[in-house]
Image: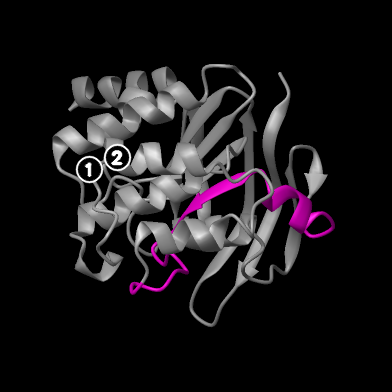
Amino acid sequence: MENILEVKNLCKSYDRFSLKNINIELPKGSIMGLVGENGAGKSTTIKSILNLVNTSDGIIKIFGLDVKEHENEIKEDIGVVLDDSFLSEYLNPTDINSIMKNIYKNWDKELFFKYIEDFNLPKDKISKEYSSGMKMKLKIAVALAHRPRLLILDEPTSGLDPVARNEILDIFQEFIQDEEHGIFVSSHITSDLESIADYITFINNGEIVLSKTRDEVLDKMRNCKMRK
């Protein structure tokens, strides 16, 4: 099966923290959940994959292309949700559309405003006036509106109520149905990953300690509970 994302021996060092030989393979048509405690390395791994931080070693390929050599080409086809939206909180959805249509070649205005409507987001309000859940929905709408092939998401259901979370999870599952797309998502809400992820990867103190299919991970967890 062809991989949409490959990470080989990724290393990144800070004064008090390091990523150590991170290896990840995400096949097309799949969702991989990245799980770990706060400070385990989830966000650093995602930022490294996006080439937002300089890494000391390792190879990262998306769509079979090296991220550092083909960054602009690759990012045309990636939808991203991070803690920082990189957009001013003094912009409303209409303002955001005017900006993003000049950034992404495949920006779809109609699709963007369909998500805005589906998510019940007011067009005339600046995002600073949104609730935390509404802000997250806006980020997801922006990430999806240029019809990416890969979604890279850092805690995308954080701050959402259960109904909104289920709505977003349904969208993620629809996204991969054609077997050509993929999602790499970090989350501390393990129940979300249990419902949608094909693969679950655990990271602890900058190292991958387990990376298996969801069923293998759930079976292992059940066996551990039975032994207690």
Residue bearing the label numbered 1: 120
In front here: 53 or 20? 53
Q: Quadrant of the N terminus?
A: top right
Residue bearing the label numbered 2: 117
Residue 142 lies, in percent from the top left, at 46, 50
Choose top left, top right, bottom left or bottom right for residue 25: top right
In front here: 69 or 104? 104
Residue 100 lies, in percent from the top left, at 55, 58
Residue 38 visible within the image: yes
Q: Residue at x 49, y 47 (%)?
A: 143
**Dot 2 amino acid type:** Glu
Q: Residue at x 38, y 29 (%)?
A: 171
In front here: 160 or 23? 160
Q: Which mark is residue 188?
A: none
1 and 2 marks in contact (CB < 8 Å): yes
- Range shown magenta: 67-90
Q: Residue furthest bottom?
A: 15
Q: Residues within 10 Å of mark 2 (few under 14, many from 20)?
A: few
Q: How many numbered marks, from 0 up?
A: 2
Choose top left, top right, bottom left or bottom right for residue 2: top right
Q: Is residue 73 magenta?
A: yes
Q: Is residue 192 above or below residue 58?
A: above
Residue 101 lies, in percent from the top left, at 59, 54
Q: Is residue 179 magenta?
A: no
**Dot 1 amino acid type:** Asn
Q: Residue furthest right?
A: 69
Q: Alpha-carbon distance for marks 1 and 2?
A: 5 Å
Looking at the image, residue 71 sits to the left or right of residue 127; the answer is: right
Residue 40 visible within the image: no
Secondary structure beneath dot 1 equals: loop
